[in-house]
Each structure stands twice: as structure tokens, then as C-alpha cells.
Amino acid sequence: MTDLPQTLVELARRYGVATEYEDWASRRITVAEATLVAVLDALGVPAGTEQQRRAALAEHDRAYWARPLPPTIVMRAGTPASFWVHVTHGDPAPVSLRLEDGTTRTGLRQLENHSAPYDLDGRLVGEASFELPPDLPLGYHELRLRLGADDVSTAVIVTPAALAPPQGLGAARSWGLAVQLYSVRSQRSWGIGDLTDMTDLAVWSAAVHAAGFLLVNPLHAAAPTAPMEPSPYLPTSRRFVNPIYLRVEAIPEYAYLRRRGRSRKAREQVQSAADRGELIDRDAAWRAKRAALHAVYEVPRSAGRELAYAAYRTREGASLDDFAIWCALAEQYGNDWHGWPRELQHPAGEAVAEFAAAHAATVDFHRWLQWQLDDQLTAAQATARQAGMGLGLMHDLAVGVDPDGADAWALQDVLALGVTAGAPPDEFNQLGQDWSQPPWRPDQLDQQAYRPFRALVNAVLRHAGGVRIDHIIGLFRLWWIPKGAAPTEGTYVRYDHEAMIGIVALEAHRAGAVVVGEDLGTVEPWVRDYLRQRGLFGTSILWFEADRDGPDPTGGPLPAERWREYCLSAVTTHDLPPTAGYLAGEHVRLRERLGLLTRPAEQELADDRAQQAAWLDELRRVGLLGDSEDVDEIVAALHQYLGRTPSRLLALSLADAVGDRRTQNQPGTTDEYPNWRVPLTGPDGKKLLVEDIVTDARAARLAEIMRAAVRPPV
């Protein structure tokens, strides 16, 4: 720290940029000056020279005093909160609060504030403080300040002190399938799993095996052009959904399509190709499905359907328009908006409006696709609940978006485009990770009253009884990597977690949903306590649950009774091979082939075998496994072990249920491994369809183990 200029340290502190941090091996690391300068530059703060840093500090002070009110005020229900007001020194500060229901509160209590006035361009500005009462209702309210003949206002967001378990969960435990939807299709799919397949899996697991939820991979939108990005965690938009998941025949207007035979033939062809192909071919599936969808789009709609479509467009507003326009632009100019004509590179440009008007039918087609997705997701959630699920669908919210995609284009003013988000090195990914995604700018989120974030959370919860938030630690601090730098050369940037977690809790409260935070990896210890305090669930993966306080200094298995209660627990995750493959050491051999290890493979394998042996010993200690080395018996015992934990939510990977062995994703790779393109198979490597799963004895056995785990016999 002593080598860094003090002005740089102070500037970084004000903008929440870490100048040092503790790595996964508990070492204190000082961040390089070049990294700090690059990260501050991405926040719009020049800091390369002493003169620039002093000017930036002065401007930071000036901007604070120039604002009459804070950009956003976030508080917890039941707890009073204070806020400041800036007016000309000596002037009154009449404030009032307009609540979401339209009523107004006045007479807010003024607090003592002895701050000295500030000289703002020759005008002395004074600061007063007021208190918001603890009895304010949950919601989004508006604070007003009268300045002469005008009013200025700011948002007041009142969030739940703690998110209560939704009615669908209550005090009970629940289990659910974890499904990579694209990987599992049926006889009537279009070469890739779709929303009808998802619904059928939900009904099977709920009606036959008493599952309470179905956790599905992120369904976020990909660019509508080839090659389609396979990773559900690198979408073009998190606000909207990928239409490749639509079931064409489930659209009401399909019944009135004149040439349905052509559509059926196209589906049969793409299904036949999927039967023959080794990997999932999204481009072929989308090419065939898009043509069929466009034919259905052109079928006249009934009066009621037209009214429903108009209501959907009104509800989604400008966000839907921006997304649909981007899709139309991408089809003409490519899916990297940085390479478009300059006049089209910002959604507010006149040329963009002219393009939309000239291509109105194409833009409307992309709007219509989202309407169909909204309909089919609504039906999927309703059907899952009718089948007996307490929660229904649990959607997955990715960390970020493609820097070249629709959200990055539409939200570029609130994203940091000069850096990418990722993760520092840890025990499992020792080279660190670069996710190639622009992170939120915390300062701009605050300036915009978190509206883009609010809309995102609201959208993902619209058709869900739960949401899993990938890398929820990113709502506290996120690893920013300057463009062109290695993942090891980044630093943490802090966010207002009170605001972001509070908004998540508020939206989940309104949706009646549970929130699961993926809190694996390098996590500050207090964060898990904070999430529990706010009513959010954590995540436990069996292989990572180590007893750091036990007799084994390397950390043996954490006994089941000491696992967290408010947690979603599973044996494995999509970033590891299915359990059968993990037991065979596939995760080590794969990383060795791809050059991702920082230690010799023999050492990694030895440590891995020792860890697995410790877990087998634990299974035997609690009486769940005898002397058998049979993989199916071990997999069954591991899932029975989950039932010994107090965890309220338990997940069974569909890949584990059917005995698949291949991993869906190897972190740290893109094309080196066919990430997110591996179809679901059985232990013999043969592809499985939904029709196979619902009659599969292995899947039924594991599903019944999960049922017994959450509903033990009386």
C-alpha cells in the first residue's frame, strides 16, 4: 500500500475500488497502480496523473454538494433512516414523501447536522438532515424537496428487513430437479430442449415424485444470428428470453397455419440431424424454428389475442422496443454493435428510430417472440404448480451479459465498458476467470435509482417461485479486470449491497418467491451471515463442504448436521462433471488436457482421491454405504446424505439422475471444450429423451431418494 500515491488510494476508496485484498490462500495482495487507474477510468474518473487525481477528488466533493438530494435512498422496513438535503445556506428545506399508493406524508423529523456550508461557485450551500419513519410501507416511493417554484425528487426504496419463506415453501423442506434444458429434448422438440419439455419434466418430478421445484439453467436471450452463443451465462440480454426455447406447436395461432405439413417436415429434419449429431446444433435448430415461427407470426390473431399483445407491449415498454430493435439491427449488421455504423451505436440516436420505422415488421416479429415466451412461461409455471409443486420453476440469473449484445447496447450508460467481470484465482480455478462481461457501474445504478436492476429482477421472477442468483457475491463486490489484462490483474469493486440485496428481497416478496444465492468460491465470511439475516438462501455443494474446524487441517467432510439450514444443497454443479464422472476423476483429467492446472496432474488426482475417500468414509460412518464400490450405490448414498443435512432445499442434477458422465461446462474455456453443447446421455453414452427419462429406473430411484430426504416417513 505504501507504494501507491495517497491521492489514488483516496480516490479508489471513494469509488469503492479495493487497493488491496486477501486472496484464496489468505495472503494480502496490493493492487497494481495500473489496475487502479484502468478501473477508475472505466468509472469515468481520470486518475493517471497526480493532477488528474486531485481534480477528480475536487469534482467528487463538488458533485456531492451540487445535488439537492441523494440519488437514491434505500431503507429497511421497521428501521428509521436518515437522509441529507442541500439548499442555499439559511434557506428552508421543505420535504414531503409521496408513497407508491399516491398518498403523501409531510412533517418528516429534522435531525441535527452541524456540517459547515460549502462554497459552490460563490453560493454557500448548507446541509440539513431528516429522518424517514420506520412504519413506511414496502415499495418504491418518491421524496420531494420544494426549491422555490420547483420540486426536485429522488427515489425512496423501502425493502423487507428479511424475506420470509414464500407460501409454497413455508416451514417445509423441498427438493427439485436441476436441469440444463437445452440438453434434454423430446420426440416433439426442434433439435433442442424447449419450454414444453421443461414443463413435462416438472410435471413428472412433481406428480410422480413430489418435487417442489425445478431449477433450470438461465433462459436468457442469445443473439438471433449464427453462430448462436451456447453459454446461457453469456447472454445478449438477461431481461429477455431466448426464443429457441419456444414450442412452435404450442402457440395458439399454429392451429390456423395453412401449411403445417411444411413445419412438421422441418421439425423432423432438425430432429433427425440432432439424433445423428454428437453435439447440440443451436444454429440448425434456430434456423428451422425461426422460419416456422415467422410463418405462425403472419397468421391473423383474434381480437382478444390482439388486445393481449397490445397489453404486453405496453407493460414492457421501451425495454422491449430496444431489445427488438437491437435484434433487427443484429440481423442486418451483425451481433457486435461496436461494429455498426456510428449513428446506430446508441439506442437514443435518431438513426436508430429511423431504422426501426423502416423495418417495423422485423422489429415487431422480435417483440412478438417475447410475447410468446411470456405466454409459454406463464403456462409452464401454472402447470408446475397444478402438478403439486410448492414453488414451481426456479429460474437462474446470470452474472452479466455479452459486451457486444443487446443489453450492453441498450444499457451502455450504466455499464462499465472498459473492464470485464470475472473471478480471482481460487483453489479450483487457479488461473482466475474472465467472463468477458461488462459489470454494472455502481455509481450509475445509484444515479438511476437502480431502475435497470429492478426491471431485471422483476422480469426473472415474473414466471417463477424462486430464483438462483449466480455469483451473488457480485452484488457485494465484483472482480473487475481491465481489458487486455489477465484475470490475476484485476481488483474488487464494491456495490451498495444494502440496495441491491434489498431490491432483490422486495421483488421476491412481491412475487412470493424464494431467492437462492450462489455463494461459492472466495467469500468474505460476513456475507453469508448477511444473506441469512435478509432471508436469502445460500448454496452448498457436497464436494466443497469441508470441516475447516475439525481434526484434519486440510478440511475433511463437513458432518451433515453442521450444514446450513437456509441453503440449497446438492452433490454437484454444472461446472463439474456429473457425479459418476467426478468419481472417476474426469474433472482433473479434463483440466490437464486443457492446460488449466497449476500443479502436476498426479498431485491433483492424489488429492482428489483422498477427498473422495474421506467422503466414502463419512458415508460409511453414518451407515449409508457398505463396502460396495459400485458407482450407482455411491451416487445414491451421496444423495441420501443430503437428506441428513438440515438444508431446506435439495437439488438433484438431471445428469446425475440418469447416470450421465460428461460435464456441461469447464470453467476457463470457450472453444477448447464443447461447453453447453453436450446432449443428455445415459451411462452408456446414448442420448436420452424426455420420454426415456420418465420411464428410467435409475432416475426414478434417485427421485424417490430425494422425496424421502425431504419427507421422511412419520
Image: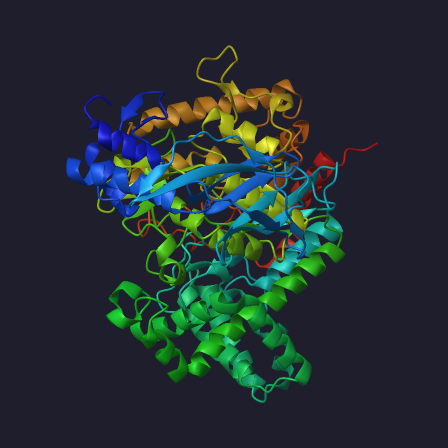
How many numbered marks appear?
Answer: 0
Quick check: 317 left or right of 42? right
Instruction: Give the percent coordinates (x, y) of residue 557.
Output: 53, 21
Q: State the image coordinates of residue 262 (x, y, percent, origin top left).
A: 52, 84
The residue sitting at the top extreme is 551
Q: Position of residue 40 (x, y in %)?
A: 27, 41
Q: Residue at x 43, y 73 (%)?
A: 287
| Residue toward you, 258 or 508 | 508
Q: Residue at 42% of width from left, 70% of height from top?
A: 284
Indicate whether 541 appears above or below 607: below
Residue 133, relative to residue 306: is it above or below? above
Evaluate whether residue 402 shows in this view. no
Q: Is residue 320 above or below residue 541?
A: below
**Is residue 196 shown left or right of residue 572?**
right
Question: Residue 422: which quarter of the image?
Answer: top left
Q: Quadrant of the C terminus?
A: top right
Name of the residue lying farthest toward the right: 714
